[in-house]
Image (cartoon, rainbow, N blue to C red):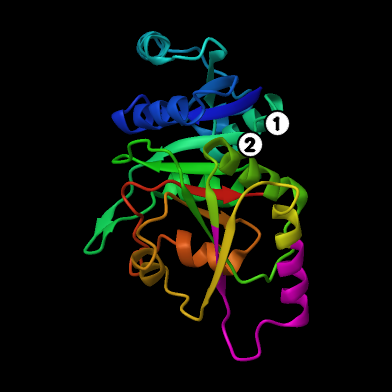
Amino acid sequence: MMNILLPTDFSANSRNAAVYALQFFKDTPCSFYLLHVVPFPAEKLTTGYINMSPEVKKNFEDLLTWLEALKTNPDHSFHICYKADYLIEAVRAKVLEKNIDLILMGTKGATNNQGAVIGKHTSDVMRKVKCPVMAVSENATFKQHKEILFPTDYKIHYGSRMLRTLLNLASLSNATVKILEIFGSEKEPSEEQMENREFLQDSFSPKVPIHQTYYSTKDHNPKKIFVSNRNVDMIVLAAKNLNLCQKFLQNDQDDNIPFINQLPLLVLHG
């Protein structure tokens, strides 16, 4: 049984993420926790609780009715969660309370001349909440994942918990994991990087029947990486790898990173 958190503001964007979750985990028993967070004046956040408004109640009722009609797995259940708090604090609390395995959320970021970018709320959750987070664009429609791109510079050690999430999700689709090795200079890979590379290889095979391919690049530009990997179905990053995460997730006004409109992005913690 998986516990999946679905933050929702009842928009079409968050509904699309919920549909994606139902389809992705159609063969997996899941408890889906639908979390709606409302902002509240700081001086009234001592309890973190206010009464749910009639409008929010109605939105939850409509959402539950809609999801129940869509689900195809009798082992899928839905639970509503409501909190007056800052978004990050509310999500963190629910992750601990419900032993959440994955946060799956929609993203509707700003746009620039190179396309859509990851929204600030989604980027904040990915970086600040220690739980695997999958972001699904408002334009995404589910398709079976056949190839997952995993960029890495091997500058961190990958823990078993972090890799377990990737391996579990890859096995649902029997997907190939395409490991993109990013080295920044002629002196790389270092001895430490090679040790991390060997650990990563050992974690995948032969214990896990998932095919991996490796190739290297010295290009750190996410825009070019996206363009040269058009056939992948998902991109995976490790949150502890701050250098790469900042390049992919930064949302600065002058240097927005384009988010592929039909491609989920998974950030791993652990």
The image quarter containing residue 238 is bottom right
Q: Residue beneath label 2, please?
A: 92
Q: Amino acid at mark 2?
A: Arg
- Indicate the quadrant where residue 56 lies: top left
Q: Is residue 175 visible?
A: yes
Residue holding disc 1: 96
Quadrant location of the N terminus in the rendered image: top right
Residue toward you, 232 or 46: 232
Q: Secondary structure at mark 1?
A: helix
Q: CA distance from mark 2 to mark 1?
A: 6 Å
Nearest to the observer: residue 160 or residue 144:
144
The reply to whether the magenta stretch includes residue 184 is yes
- For badge 1, the amino acid type reads Leu
* Element at label 2: helix
Q: In this picture, which residue range is highlighted in magenta?
A: 178-199
Rendered view: 228 above or below 259: below
Image marks 2 and 1: residues in contact by CB distance under 8 Å: yes
- The local crowd at label 2, few if under 14, some if 14 to 19, many if 20 or more residues have their Cα within 10 Å, is some
